[in-house]
Image: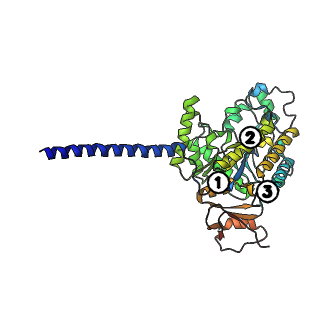
Amino acid sequence: MVGAGLRGERRGKDLKLTTRVFAVTGIVVCGLVAGSFLFGGARSAIAWRSFRAVVIQSDDWGLAGFVPHADAWRGLDREKLASGSFPEVYWLSTLEDSAMVAALNTVLSGHSGRDGHPAVLQPNYVMSSLAHTGDRWVRYDLPDLPPLYRRPGLWNAVEEGIARGTWYPEFHATWHYDPEIRKRGALTAGIARKVTDRGIMLFPGSERAWELGSWRSRSDLGREVDHSLAVFRNLFGRDVHSVMAPDYHWDDRIEAMWGNRNLRVIQGKREQLNPAWGTGKFGRVRKYVMRQWTRLRYPGRIYLERNCRLEPVQAPDPDSVVRTCVEETRGAWAAGQPAIVESHRINFAHTDSAVVAVGLDALDRYLGEISGNSWESPVYLTDHELAQLYDRGTSWSVRDGVVVVRNATRSRKVVGIPAEALARAAGEGEFRSTGWGALVAVPAGSTIDLVPLQ
């Protein structure tokens, strides 16, 4: 009986020990899961510290606004329209012209990465605009523009930049505002009607008339994005690879809409604004948790987070902006991340030539600062390339008339190139390939340029 009692006591101790082990194990597992959920970032197949990638994303290109020319506000009190709603420099923001695009391409082409390809800007385009003519609203899809915003030679300059490999368009918006709210507000009495007649894009409440607002129907938004994707393909000869929401305002249904159209590369998730999350500390916590949950729930989506700011014309000290952006770029590399730079159109397109000069000079100095010695030089990428590298460590892209094939892993890889990409790069020449494309063996850490036969 004594032996049985001791055995029962040992079994009781073993049971308690086993329970503790399971409890500790559960806590550890839950901690790891929670840590992955809360602090996990984008997955990567490569070592970014040595790759030193730079992507330059720029919003608002193609937007017919804020004003068509420098004299648009003459005799009008703009504060009566939207008091204090926009940074000062934006009041005279305008659609780019051929000279502005050409000047920007010149700066970009003056800086090459260590692979020999020039710095490339990714302009995110607004595809359509509205103008009130007579008694009706008229829609203009790029490359068409409202009469007051006509820019002779603009698209020739864009095509030249694409051919040089310094200009790689992506998708931003259809309108950059809710078109129905604009139609209602722009024709009300007083200053609203006057600015509309002068081609000014602003209208009462425009600062909150978000194109992707939660009040807009799924069917309307779906029709708009389908139309815009078709306009984009007709204009640039390829599909959209990446998307950036206008005004940073979007919700889960928008991402689902994009996903249904194979738009899985999303810019600026960290900057997303959603009024449903609330404000203050609680709103920030909810935003963070929702962002991490979305990453976990939709592993097929790739979120490219902007971690450098190059917005010199909105700052009192442009030199400081450049220095900070250089530090942020090197900090991103040191943290094992690509540097994804935000630099809006306002820095390079404006009615005041002095503003444009500040923006171009800041970009030129930034690119010069991050180049360093040849072995330290960055590689300039697009979202299309970056997303592929995240997925599998290799990428292909059509730039400056060649197919650029990259392998950023530590082993030799075979990369498949679709026939459409070969045809787009070939132009008047041709590639030797099968009907469905080509397979290219790329050594570890290398870039290969496929040049068409002439």
What residue is shown with label 2? 324
Distance from disc 2 to disc 3, alpha carbons, whole Å, reads: 21 Å
Q: Who comes first in sequence, dot 3 or dot 1?
A: 1
Q: Position of residue 434 (x, y in %)?
A: 65, 74
72 is higher (above) or lower (below) than 227 = above
Residue 64: name its quadrant: top right
Mark number, residue 112: 3
Q: Residue at x 35, y 46 (%)?
A: 22
Residue in the foreground of this view, choosing between 72 and 378: 378
Mark number, residue 48: 1
Q: Secondary structure at mark 3?
A: loop
Q: Secondary structure at mark 1?
A: helix
Q: Position of residue 36 (x, y in %)?
A: 51, 46
Q: Position of residue 238 (x, y in %)?
A: 70, 58
Of the 4 image quadrants, the one containing the C terminus is: bottom right
266 is higher (above) or lower (below) than 442 = above
Distance from disc 3 to disc 1, alpha carbons, whole Å, reads: 19 Å
Task: Please name the amino acid that badge 1 sits on.
Answer: Trp
Q: Who comes first in sequence, dot 1 or dot 2?
A: 1
Q: Secondary structure at mark 2?
A: helix
Disc 3 residue crowd, few under 14, some 14–19, many 20+, Cα 10 Å: many
Q: Residue at x 76, y 49 (%)?
A: 370
Residue in the foreground of this view, choosing between 275 and 389: 389
